[in-house]
Image (cartoon, helix red, strand yellow):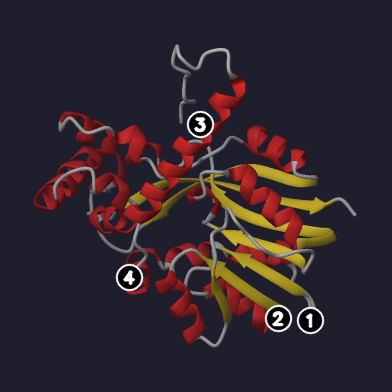
Amino acid sequence: MPEDKPTSGQRGDPAADAVRQASQKASQQASQQASQHWDPHRYNRNAGFVAELGAPLLDLLQPAKGERVLDLGCGEGALTAKIAAAGAAVVGVDSSPEQVAAAKARGLDARVMNGEALTFEAEFDAVLSNAALHWMLDPDAVLRGVAAALKPGGRFVAEMGGQGNVETITQALFASLQARGADPVKACPWYFPAPEAYQARLEAAGFAVESIALIPRPTPLPGEIGGWLETFAEAFLKQVPADEGLALIAEVAERLRPSLCDSEGRWSADYVRLRFVARLAG
């Protein structure tokens, strides 16, 4: 996303620029969080594959009996439960009260917490995060919180959307919104970094990066692309009046059909994931 440019009245005043940009970022984040509602039933129906495809992270994490693990962006707790089954004491956090309630219904220790404002101090041997970090638009705040939550030498294993993730879908959303006079840039709720950029952020937060890579992963969807859009693109859909939402979804689907729907009507999403393993300095 483009950086804010200073106005002429603020040019030459770095402190004022910093305050203004922080205020604008906070306002944008609050607006986007309010625009995205996580319904556990809808999520499982349209995106149950997300936890399934995150299973390789558990092989990288290798949770051990007696360890304390934080699941950052735990959702309804599918991977959290697997960590618990391995014998680790796991805490799941998520910004969605509905998802946390679903995780608690599994008998998990799940808490409503903003990933950009974690409150833990040197409590965990490891942090896991699957398909959540790209929803957090202040990555440095996230990484500071993760570093504070880990014990010295603790590990951070995660997968998120990376550079190029859902690029085809995003382009279709942008085109359809721009045709309606809406501004898709301010609506975009995602942060999809390049490996080099995210590695630099990790290292600045005190982590040694053991591995980091982009993984192109075109992903079959359980239904039509409309279900994916309803689940993940609410921030875009809410840029038009409610009575235009279905028409917008239909238009975006037609833009995407040539590239993301095969001859038998099976849809996929053009996922590119960023997966990494990092360790906090001991």
Q: Earlier in the sequence, mark 1 or mark 4?
A: 4
Q: Which mark is residue 65?
A: 1
Are dots 1 and 2 in contact, CB under 8 Å?
A: yes
Pointer 2 local density, CA inside 10 Å: few below 14, some 14–19, many at least 20: some
Query: Is residue 209 shown left or right of residue 98?
Result: right
Residue at 73% across / 79% down in the picture?
A: 88
Query: Is residue 147 shown left or right of residue 247?
Result: right
Most extreme residue toward the right is: 282
- The amino acid type of the residue labelled 2 equals Ala
Nearest the camera: 185 or 15? 15
Nearest the camera: 137 or 24? 24
State the image coordinates of residue 250 (x, y, percent, origin top left).
Answer: 15, 48
Are dots 2 and 4 in contact, CB under 8 Å?
A: no
Q: Earlier in the sequence, mark 2 or mark 4?
A: 4
- The amino acid type of the residue labelled 3 equals Gln
The residue at which mark 2 appears reads as 86
- The amino acid type of the residue labelled 4 equals Arg
